[in-house]
Image: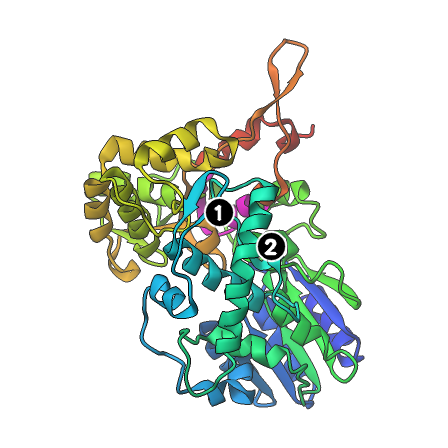
Amino acid sequence: MNPTDEQAAAADVFRAGDHLVLQAGAGTGKTTTLALLAKATTRRGRYLAYNRAIAQEAATRFPHTVICKTAHAMAYAAIGHRYARRLGGPRQPSWRTGQALGITKPVRIGGRDISPRTLSNTTLRTVTRFCHSADDHLCPHHVPRLRGLEGDDHYAQFAETIVPFARKVWADLQHPEDGVVRFDHDHYLKIWALTRPQTTAEYLLLDEAQDTNPVVEQIFTAQRDHAQLVMVGDSAQAIYHWRGARDVMTGFDGTALSLSQSFRFGPRLAAEANRWLALTDAPIRLTGSETVLTEMGPVEQPEAVLCRTNVGAMATVMDLLATGQQVGLVGGGGSLQALALAARDLKEGRRTGHPELVLFTCWGEVQDYAAHDPAGRDLQPLVDLVDTHGTDALLIAISRILPEEQAQVTVSTAHKAKGREWLRVRIADDFTPPEDSDDHDETGAPVPGPIDDGEARLAYVAVTRARRQLDLGGLSWINDHPAGNPQ
């Protein structure tokens, strides 16, 4: 394949030795472009992949001068192997780990009793958040917030309780031979990052840079004085901020170029993608391939249905199963099952350890929280689903989910669909429009509120998963929103 003008320009900058940040829109062939850069030099390079599957696939496309690995694989080779005895240790409930750390009594904050089980679980999550950060020390801001404990004063009190235990966990993890805390891959990555490692590679290629954890960003950018840095990604696909990821492309000091020619879909879908890109203030607009015919309109038999939330995915799975279809779910049904089991526990008068529902003592509290507390509004679909179908029906439906390769239709959240593509895609109904503002138009009708930047990014990811047919479905409200039709 002859390189496009954009790809050729990127190769020229790379050969000149400049640091490079490459904005690559959906379907624009970013891996092909990175391989093109690597083949343009005899220097030794490293390709940092988002996950192991991507690294393995990239290794078949890059020259032998490039080592394709994840940051975790690099960390394991450098330091993680010392902890091999502790890796893959037996799983145990967080409360048992907490017990070994001295978490044995409940704590009362904000009128709620926080059990040792919840304290233990939050302590381990705090350490995970620290491991994903670029911070040198574990601090109160690493403590996650809990539903039902949203006030700043209560959160500060809660964090003050958790941090000493979290530091005790981190101290335990420093021992290569044994300890009471289960050792995992994020732990040795952080331990390695704290040593301020330096690579011997002459250039680094960072893929999916828009969703880089701060700890990986720190390792990558620290190499700029002795290695050429190239980061590639799509800022408009930065959808994991809630998980600690950060778009490191926007402020990067390097030559900024873009890939805007999409080979995945045609001009009509590119125009739809550009509508959402405009809402995110993205630095690129896409051009569709003239040789690809992508239709916009109703899709009766989609290959994939993309949902906004896990709860929306659960509802979609049940609807499709009711029509007799064989249904697959990206990532499997584990997260849905955990939610359904947590709801069942609460309905039967038992507390649950699920982090979304851990502070509630019964299902009635969840119903009230979802209905009356603004912070709990996103739980209302779960409440509706449980109250309509019951937890047993939900669990039965989840047990009928098939592996993707055996399914007629695949259900996915938009988050898990990133990096994937299907021929025929339908957008599910749980992508709801923004609430109306307090303003009214000349007819007296309420004016729709502004579209949240994060929601526009997620919509962009969702609509660009299709190759031949896209049913806008739950995102069709954009057609009636002023921001979606500036003219």
Residue appearing at x 26%, y 31% in the figure: 388
Q: Quadrant of the C terminus?
A: top right
Q: Position of residue 55 (x, y in %)?
A: 50, 77
Secondary structure of the residue carrying tag 2 is loop
**Whether residue 421 can be seen here:** no
Residue lying furthest top: 443
Q: Position of residue 466 (x, y in %)?
A: 46, 50
Q: In the rendered image, which residue does mark 1 sit on?
A: 146
Residue lying furthest front: 105
Disc 2 vs disc 1: which is toward the camera?
1
Q: Is residue 3 left or right of residue 318?
A: right
Q: Is residue 469 left or right of residue 258?
A: left
Q: In the rendered image, which residue does mark 2 sit on?
A: 238
The kind of residue tagged 2 is Ala
Q: Position of residue 294 (x, y in %)?
A: 49, 47
Magenta-colored span: 456-472
N-terminal-most mark, 2 or 1? 1
The kind of residue tagged 1 is Leu
Question: Foreground residue, 18 or 251?
Answer: 251
Quadrant of res 479: top right
Q: Is residue 233 magenta?
A: no
